[in-house]
Image: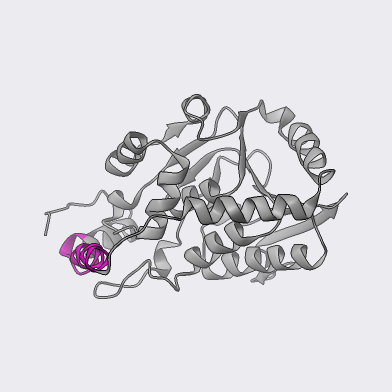
Amino acid sequence: MDDVTAGKPLVSTQIDNRVGTIILNNPEKRNALSHALIEAVITGLQAFEEADVRVVVLRAQPGVKVWSSGHDVYELPSGGRDPLGWDDPLRELVRAIEECPAPVIAIVEGGVWGGACEVVFACDLIIAAPDATFAVTPAKLGVPYNVSGMLTFMNACPMRIVKEMVFTAKPLSAERAESLGIINHMVPSKELDSFTQALSESIALNAPLSISVMKEQLRMLAGAHPMSPRRFERVQGLRRLVWESEDYEEGLRAFKQKRAPRFSGR
């Protein structure tokens, strides 16, 4: 059950003792969240649901330096279009993780950047190696993040940490993330597999219907942030200022030219 590009599977999947594992498998491109890779992960989640899997593990190949670099910047639209709208593939992946009836556990080694950070934070439990780091990087590209994504960060982190991460775009260490309750456990790299296996198997022994209902309850309660139509329109208007700006075009251009961006604030 692999999605293949140029003859190589972008993800691999396996099931063992009702625990399904999805492994990101495109390290040459730092597991960038391309449309094809996201589709492969979602397909894996759907197949696991059909197979009555009780726990899902999402990870990259062991020992990677970058878990995922986030959005495939080459697939982002040019100025004049919302780069992170409701139908953006990343939004579909986050919804698939949140709506998956089985708990989703992220195993993280290496750097997690941009949209990949939201994917990890959308998972139900996070187990990270000491070298794991988490960086929210839209400000480096001049990209306006969306409301749903901001809620993911707000539900995962204290507000001042969210602000620090989105304003500075600097990585948060696994040690600090654990101390803040953002991740569940920091575990030595060589113990990640055995620790997560034991945790997954203990969850799989419990009542799956009870767990899936409680997960859905928590998802609905976490998303219970009422916003008036006027405020929502205001947020969308502010985001439009960014994706139609010179800075947005400059951020994409600088990334593709592998140089530091020169933002003007316009």
> Which residue is at a point 54% across and 63% down the rendered structure image?
95
* Image quarter hosting the C terminus: bottom left
Q: Can residue 20 be seen?
A: no
The spot of residue 89 in percent (x, y) is: 50, 69
Lateral position of residue 16 relative to residue 190, left or right:
right
Magenta stretch prevailing secondary structure: helix
Lateral position of residue 57 relative to residue 111, left or right:
right
The spot of residue 113 in percent (x, y) is: 45, 47
Front residue of 12 and 6: 12
**For residue 197, what is the image quadrant?**
top right
> Which residue is at a point 48% across and 47% down the rendered structure image?
117
Instruction: Tell me: residue 224, above or below residue 197.
Output: below
Asked if the stretch drawn in magenta spans residue 137, the answer is no
Q: Residue furthest right?
A: 17
Q: Can residue 53 be seen?
A: yes
Lateral position of residue 222 relative to residue 99, left or right:
left
Q: How is the image coloured?
A: one colour
How many discs appear?
Answer: 0
> Which residue is at a point 37% across and 52% down the rendered structure image?
150
The spot of residue 143 in percent (x, y) is: 30, 58
Instruction: Tell me: residue 173, above or below residue 1.
Output: above
The spot of residue 112 in percent (x, y) is: 50, 44
Instruction: Tell me: residue 187, above or below residue 223.
Output: above
* Image quarter hosting the N terminus: bottom right
> Which residue is at a point 72% across and 50% down the rendered structure image?
211
Front residue of 238 and 38: 238
Lateral position of residue 255 relative to residue 37, left or right:
left
**For residue 242, what is the image quadrant?**
bottom left
Asked if the stretch drawn in magenta spans residue 242, the answer is yes
The magenta region covers: 230-247
